[in-house]
């Protein structure tokens, strides 16, 4: 994706208030993110570990969603989990259930959408082999990087649709 500025990120959020979007913690290395390897920008709030954010480009504009990270502590130590976006499997702790408040009336009523995601939201780097999941890996190695990236973006689009439209 193209590099984005702090202002663009803060004004992209669809499921939190303007005040929340103004205060949320941005990645400290925002200008130095590996943009050309990113399908979307994802990060954990440096000041609030239970919060995560995801910003993607859709039809030329940016769409950001705020997520709440649910700890995966109830899962067995040996269990493996798969990220629902990039399909990378991780051992314990590498994947977490993250929930997004839905937009509009549904969100005001407390409606959320949950997905299991890489806890560091580095899906783009895992699928390109730029980062390795300890003790695990991508399951379907027969796909090219382009195909994995396209699949991840399709999965992300359907997640964003669920947040925005139910
Ligand atoms: Zn992932």
Image (tube, helix red, strand yellow):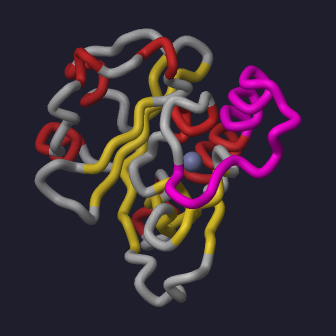
Which of the 4 quarters of the picture holds residue 107? bottom left
Q: Is residue 23 magenta?
A: no
Query: Left or right of 5: which side holds 14?
Result: right
Q: Looking at the image, which is closer to me, 140 or 161?
A: 140
Q: Looking at the image, which is closer to me, 50 or 109?
A: 50
Which residue lies at the image location 42% right of the left edge and 16% below the top edge?
35
Residue 13 lies, with reference to residue 56, above or below; the image says below
Which of the 4 quarters of the picture holds residue 34? top left
Residue 11 lies, with reference to residue 43, above or below; the image says above
The picture places residue 12, in percent across and down from the top left corner, at 36, 29
The picture places residue 94, in percent across and down from the top left corner, at 47, 62
Residue 66 visible to an observer of this rendering: yes
The picture places residue 122, in percent across and down from the top left corner, at 46, 40
Q: Is residue 139 magenta?
A: yes
State the quadrant of the C terminus.
bottom right
Q: Which residues are magenta?
A: 133-154
Which residue lies at the image location 50% right of the left edge and 23% below the top edge?
38
């Amino acid at each position: 994706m193209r590099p984005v500025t702090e202002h663009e990120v803060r004004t992209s959020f669809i499921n939190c208030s303007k005040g929340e979007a103004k205060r949320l913690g941005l990645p400290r290395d925002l200008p130095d993110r590996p943009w050309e390897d990113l399908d979307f920008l994802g990060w954990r709030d440096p000041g609030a570990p239970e919060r995560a954010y995801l910003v993607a480009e859709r039809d030329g504009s940016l769409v950001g969603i705020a997520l709440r990270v649910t700890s995966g502590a109830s899962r067995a130590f040996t269990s493996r989990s798969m990220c629902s976006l990039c399909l990378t499997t991780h051992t314990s702790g590498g994947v977490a259930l993250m929930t997004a408040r839905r937009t509009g009336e549904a969100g005001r009523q407390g409606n959320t959408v949950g997905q299991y995601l890489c806890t560091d939201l580095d899906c783009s780097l895992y699928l390109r082999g730029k980062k390795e999941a300890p003790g695990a890996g991508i399951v379907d190695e027969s796909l090219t990087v382009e195909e994995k990236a396209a699949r991840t973006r399709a999965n992300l689009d359907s997640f964003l649709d669920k947040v925005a439209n139910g």
